[in-house]
Amino acid sequence: MQTAAATVAANFAAVKGMIAKAAAKAGRAANGVTLVAVSKTHGADAIRPLLTAGHRVFGENRVQEAMAKWPALKQEYPDIELHLIGPLQTNKVKDAVALFDVIQSVDREKLARALSDAFAKRGAACDCYIQVNTGAEPQKAGVLPADADAFIGLCRDELHLPVRGLMCIPPVDEEPALHFALLRKIADRNGLKNLSMGMSGDFEKAIAFGATHIRVGSAIFGGRA
């Protein structure tokens, strides 16, 4: 019987193969797609097989959970790039910017201002992505598509945040391609290169629409621990 570590390593290799295939089909280079391995709810033991395989880009949903496991791993592997992909409360901003390298969930003015202040105090900034609520779902975080251009302008021009791209989570019951196309359109007109879109169930489609970052958890680590 395969060990848990061997299963994770095999899943990881399979996902890498699927990325290469999807990129080739889209006429893109596989190295133009960054795999953000989403390790939420999984401990260091599950993460280590990926680190051993040379992978360094990971995503977490919660600041508190990340603080419990990543400082030690980052000390061991200083080239880890950690992405916050879940909602960020303003009272957690100080902790978030100390631990994460990329904040993918910038979604409102209050948070953008809190990040700007935190970066100024630290004298260093994390790369930022604007989260767009492409499905205009009331229960979901993200700036509405109609407000995206103005919000991107505020973040870049007034608050001087290093906005590198956009992120979205399509509604579960809708065709994701429509949402990937919309996110790409908003990015193009704002001169943003990076698109974080696509998860375990739809990342191949996201690659076809130009995703530069895909967020894959369950296809690598299995269900929630």
Image (cartoon, rainbow, N blue to C red):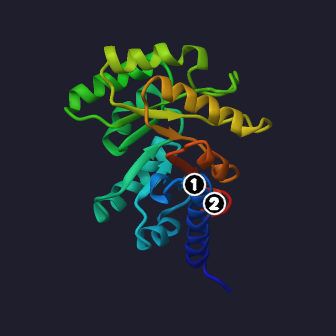
> Which of the 4 quarters of the picture holds residue 143?
top right
Name the N-terminal-most of marks 2 and 1. 1
Residue 166: image location, x then y, percent:
50, 32
Q: Label 2 is placed on what type of residue?
A: Ala
210 relative to 204 in the view: left or right? left
115 relative to 144 in the view: left or right? left
Give the class, few, some or many, for how many residues have Cα within 10 Å of label 1's Cα (few <14, many ≥20): some
Q: Classify 45 as above or below 162.
A: below
Give the class, few, some or many, for how many residues have Cα within 10 Å of label 2's Cα (few <14, many ≥20): few
Residue named by callout 2: 225
What is the count of numbered marks?
2
Dots 2, 1 in contact, CB < 8 A: yes
178 relative to 45 in the view: left or right? right
Q: Classify 17 as above or below 206.
A: below
Quarter placement of the N terminus: bottom right
Residue named by callout 1: 41
**Front-most of 147 and 23?**
23
Residue lying furthest right = 173
Quick one: SS at disc 2? loop
Q: Label 1 is placed on what type of residue?
A: Thr
Residue 202: image location, x then y, percent:
68, 49
Query: Residue at 40% across / 69% down in the picture?
Result: 54
Query: Residue at 38% across / 38% down in the picture?
Result: 96
Quick one: SS at disc 1? loop
Query: Residue at 57% across / 25% down in the picture?
Result: 142
Residue 26: image location, x then y, percent:
60, 52
Quarter placement of the C terminus: bottom right
Distance of mark 2 from mark 1, alpha carbons? 6 Å
